[in-house]
Image (spheres, helix red, strand yellow):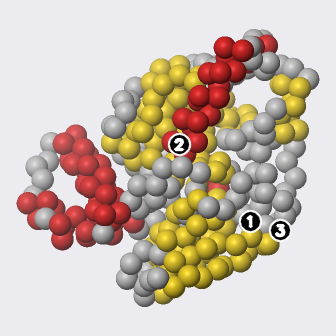
Amino acid sequence: MDFIRSATMLCLDILINHLKKQGIKMVRAIQSFAGLTLLASACAAQAFPTQQVVPGGLVILPLASQEEHRPMAYYAGARVTVVSEGDSWVALVGIPLDTEPSLQQLKVNLGGVQQTISFEVQPKHYRTQHLRIKDNNKVEPDEDSSERIVQEMVLQKRLTKQYTGEVLSTEFIRPVAGRDSGRFGLRRILNGQQRQPHSGMDIAAATGTPVKVVAPGRVIYTGNLFFSGNVVYVDHGGGLISMYAHLNQINVKNGEVLEQGDYLGTVGSSGRATGPHLHWSVYLNGTAINPALFL
């Protein structure tokens, strides 16, 4: 009940914010808990992302039919996003990019009964990309920078593993108009040195181009990170998180509730970047997955 109420309140905040913009007064019926529950149900209606059962992809698994309470599901120890579909429940499971092709298991609690659902991860080849970074400290960080990076990794892990209420929507829009300049999963060679694979989708655009939030949610972090530059993290509920990096300006604050399409900042080249672009990441159960699957 707490999860339903939490998501309901966030959904209500978004609706109230929209109505205020339109100059419309709230009616008392919506303020009742029954009204809130109906509102949450309306918010839960959504289209699913594209399934790709590969490293860096996601698998959509049906859980149970006519189960009143939302099942709890876990993959590799992390809680998984569970959404309603008619009178049944469905798990959206993010598959880490470093997962080897193999049989994987989802642990599910259905009304106190433990179940295991298996799925097969298929192989996926990701291309290699060579980039030249002018600031070599962004490739080979000095001692002070390395300490900062470690602290920021802890922060980012905490942000991407948040699980609050239920998903408001999985029907995303593109965050910015522009050219797709860097695909998810690219094996990156920076200044001749191998680094971590690309954990998001790059969209090239002119500095100052407005960036929109892809779905309704709440801002959970704004700030400047060593590699990502100026960033915004948005919680869409139920373990679904989006991140927007290398921004020139940030136009939202922590805790701010956003409607889909609200502007949160502008394109820039802050952090480790070769030019102005948006780096957009999407996280499920704490792992980065291909954002293009939501478009």
247 relative to 167, above or below: above
Among all residues in the image, which is located at the extreme right? 192
Tag 3: amino acid: Ser
Q: Position of residue 118 (x, y in %)?
A: 71, 77
Q: Position of residue 1 (x, y in %)?
A: 30, 69
Disc on res. 53? 1
Residue of label 3: 102
Tag 2: amino acid: Arg
Q: What element carries label 3?
A: loop
Q: Is mark 1 on a helix, strand or loop?
A: loop
In this picture, residue 61 sits left or right of residue 82:
right
Classify mark 3: residues with Cα within 10 Å, few (<14), some (14-19) or many (20+): few
Is tag 1's residue or tag 3's residue first in the polypeptide sequence? 1
Residue 275: in sight, yes or no? no
- Residue 175 vs residue 115, the one in the foreground: 115
In this picture, residue 25 sits left or right of residue 147:
left
In this picture, residue 160 sits left or right of residue 271:
left
Q: Which of marks 2 and 3 is in front?
A: 2
Classify mark 2: residues with Cα within 10 Å, few (<14), some (14-19) or many (20+): few
Q: Residue, x 87% and y 43% (percent of image)?
A: 127
Tag 1: amino acid: Val
Residue of label 2: 158
- Residue 144 vs residue 96, the one in the foreground: 144
Counting the numbered discs, the total is: 3
Q: Residue, x 64% and y 51% (percent of image)?
A: 287
Q: Is mark 2 on a helix, strand or loop?
A: helix
